[in-house]
Image (tube, helix red, strand yellow):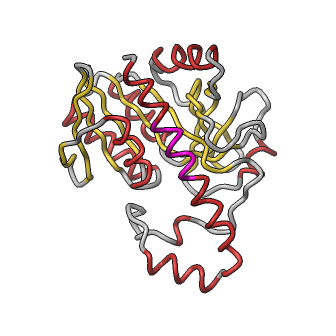
Amino acid sequence: MKIGIITAMPEEFRAVADSLGTATAARVGTFKAACFGLIGHEFLLVESGMGFGNAAMAAEMLVRDGRPDLLVTTGFCGAVAPELLTGDIVVAKEIIIAKEDVFEAVPMLLSSIGQNFVARQAAGGKRVVGGTFVSTSVITSKKRLAGIMPGSYPSPVVEMESGAIAMVAAKTNVPLLAIRAVSDSAAEELSFSLEEFCDPDMRCIRIHKVLLTVLQKPFIIPQLIRLSRSSRRAAESLTATLSCLFSDL
C-alpha cells in the first residue's frame, strides 16, 4: 500500500518520522518530504505548513506525485471537549469546517482503518477515541467554539488543516484517515497566535518573531512553557500510537 501523510509543522513531522524508522529525504513540489518503507508499505511524509492554503496545496501535490492508496492527516490539535486530556489521541469520525457560526461537514470516504483502530485501542484501555475534527481557517477560541457548536458532535477538537486535506481526498477519491494528538486542553486558551511567530506563508516559525512577541507580551511566557511541555507529551503519544497503527496495517 502507498500511504501519503501530511503534517503542518516540524514537531509533528518529527513525531511521525519517529514512528516510521529510517527516512530518505525527498521533496513534494515546494514542500519538505521524506520516504519510508515499513512492513511492505511505502510511506511519503510531507510537511505542509499551517493553514488551509498550505494543506490543500500539499495534499494536491502529494496525490498527484505519490498516487497514494490512503491519505493521512495528522499532528496536534486543541481539545474543545473538556473530557479530552493532553496526549489523548482522536481519530476523526467526521470532519467539519467552521466559518463564523456555520459548521459544514466535508463529504469524504473515511478509511475503516481509523475506527477499527479506535475499537482495538479502547478495548485495551488506551485513551484513543473517535471524534469530530473542527477545521478553521484562522486561530479560533476553543471556548467560543464550545459555546456555538451543536451538542451532537462527539469529542470535538480544533485544528487548521484537515478540512482542506479532506476536500482534496474527496475530490480525488482517496480514502482518508485523520488522527491527531491533543496538545492543549479545553481549559488552556492561548493569549497569542502562532501566526505571530511564523513567516507570512505560515510554513516556518522564526525565533526572532517569537522573541519580539514575548517582548511585547511577556505575560505569555508561562503559556509558552506549558505549551512546550504539552507538545512534547503530544508528540510522544502520537509517535507511540502511529507506531502501533502502522505496524498493524
In the rendered image, residue 237 lying in the magenta stretch gets the answer yes
* 122 relative to 27 in the view: left or right: right
In the rendered image, residue 190 lying in the magenta stretch gets the answer no
Looking at the figure, which quarter contains the N terminus? Answer: top left
Query: Looking at the image, is 43 positioned above or below residue 26?
Result: above
Residue 11: give x, y in percent of width and height: 43, 53
Residue closer to the observer: 100 or 207: 207
Residue closer to the observer: 45 or 30: 45
Residue 190: give x, y in percent of width and height: 68, 62
Residue 71: give x, y in percent of width and height: 36, 29
Residue at coordinates 63% horizontally, 14% vertically from top-left? 123
Query: For the image shown, how many numbered marks are present on the structure?
Result: 0
Residue 177 is drawn in which quadrant?
Answer: top left
Magenta span dominant secondary structure: helix
Query: Looking at the image, is 167 positioned above or below residue 41?
Result: below
For the record, the magenta segment spans 231-239
Residue closer to the observer: 113 or 158: 113
* 178 relative to 36 in the view: left or right: right
Residue at coordinates 45% horizontally, 38% vertically from top-left? 239
